[in-house]
Amino acid sequence: MQGSTSEGSALADRSQRHEVIVTGDEGSARLDRVLAIHIPELSRSRLKSLILAGQVFVGKSAAGNVSAAAGSNDPPPVRDPAYHVNAGDTIIIDVPPARPAEPEGEAIALDIVYEDEDLIVINKPKGLVVHPAAGHETGTLVNALIAHCGASLSGIGGVRRPGIVHRLDKDTTGLMVAAKNDAAHQSLSAQFADHGRTGALQRGYLAFVWGPPNRRQGTIDAPIDRHPHAREKMAVRAGGREAITHWEVRDTFNGRDGKPVAALLACRLETGRTHQIRVHLAHAGHPLMGDDVYGPHFKTKASQLGPRTRSTLEALGRQALHAWLLAFEHPRTGEILSWEAPLPEDLVLLRDALAATE
């Protein structure tokens, strides 16, 4: 395979020019697919957008001597991603510098667990929205990552922004990973789409729930879709998207009467639907403690708790859910990376109060 860039390790704020000579062994004659083989650091969608924007040129050159300097000697641009190239053709692709992200960077403190040139892993606190949206245009994790990562963001799809491959609810704490470049974004997105069925990805959650299950472990396999009436909620519905949650009991807690009232579950996702754990556990009759969206009818169970525990639960002010485990294959090195985040202080207080039956 022959392929090069005139900039080498150019900084993210400089344009780059790649030159590729078609070998004929690429397995496809389509322009976009040939480029994807030779320039894997750019996503297929990014390559397609560059082709449509007139940034890709195809010419004949037996020795691959097309000039690497921009100028009138360039062959005409090809704007069709399905254009067929032939062995010996030389393809030039100009990659403009990544545009500044539309969300602005904000100096928001981050609990960084790991960081390198390809990705960043953080321990998200409660109350932090992941992505800007209506009602949360600022103060999000994306704003914080743009400010923290700065020039190390080489651009996702041509925009200097972090690649969000999964999300946590605003009030769910724990481990999250974001990509810094297209290649890392592609790899992580594929791993999360596979949900660990064939790869190294693992996502583990700790959940405090009402009512201990009647067995030590189990699986909830129930499709999830939008709630038919409350559109801001999700629900188990026939015809929805496949959703599978595995769980096991880590601990059980008694109420003032000495009878079991709550449990700590370790959950593992085999799919990644919106609010999946919250919806599935509520559907199974064990909603998350503190979840006012999916478990408000369980508030009466608080009367079975001691005064200290009731006070601690009221002060929690959120669903008792924490993403404690994250593992995946590093996009560049192939190394299996794994992290565990201990329970945050508010959930430690809840656990201790439940255990003390006070």
Image (cartoon, rainbow, N blue to C red):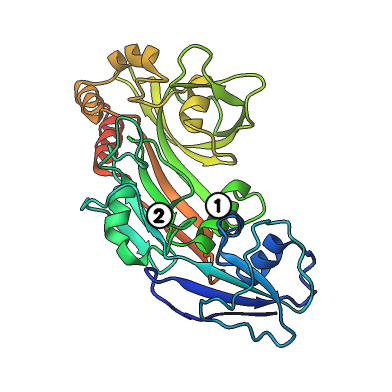
Q: For residue 84, which quarter of the picture?
A: bottom right
Helix, strand or loop status at disc 1: helix
Quadrant occupied by the N terminus? bottom right
Q: CA distance from mark 2 to mark 1?
A: 13 Å
Q: Amino acid at mark 1?
A: Ser
**Residue 249 disc label:** none
Q: SS class of the residue under badge 2?
A: loop
In the rendered image, which residue does mark 1 sit on?
189
**Could you say which is closer to the camera, residue 223 or residue 53?**
53
Compare marks 2 and 1 and give the one earlier in the sequence: 2
**Mark 2 near mark 1, Cβ–Cβ under 8 Å?**
no
Name which residue lies at 50% across and 19% down: 285
Mark 2, mark 1: which one is toward the viewer?
2
Q: Residue furthest front?
A: 72
Residue visible at 49% across and 63% down in the picture:
337
Please rate how many residues cluster around mark 2, counting C-alpha atoms within 10 Å: few if below 14, some from 14 to 19, many from 20: many
Give the answer, above or below, for where 93 lies relative to 54.
below
- Residue at x 59% of width, y 75% of height: 74
Question: Which residue type carries mark 2?
Answer: Pro
Residue 329 visible in the picture: no
Q: Position of residue 38 (x, y in %)?
A: 65, 72
Q: For residue 224, say whether it is visible.
A: yes
Residue 166, above or below 349? below
Q: Position of residue 152 (x, y in %)?
A: 36, 66
In the displayed structure, 66 sits above or below 47; it is: below
Instruction: Please identify the quadrant where the C terminus is shown.
Output: top left
Q: Is residue 341 above or below residue 293?
A: below
Q: Quadrant of residue 167?
A: top left
Q: Nearer the viewer, residue 99 or 231?
A: 99
Residue identified by numbered label 2: 162
Give the percent coordinates (x, y) of residue 53: 55, 56
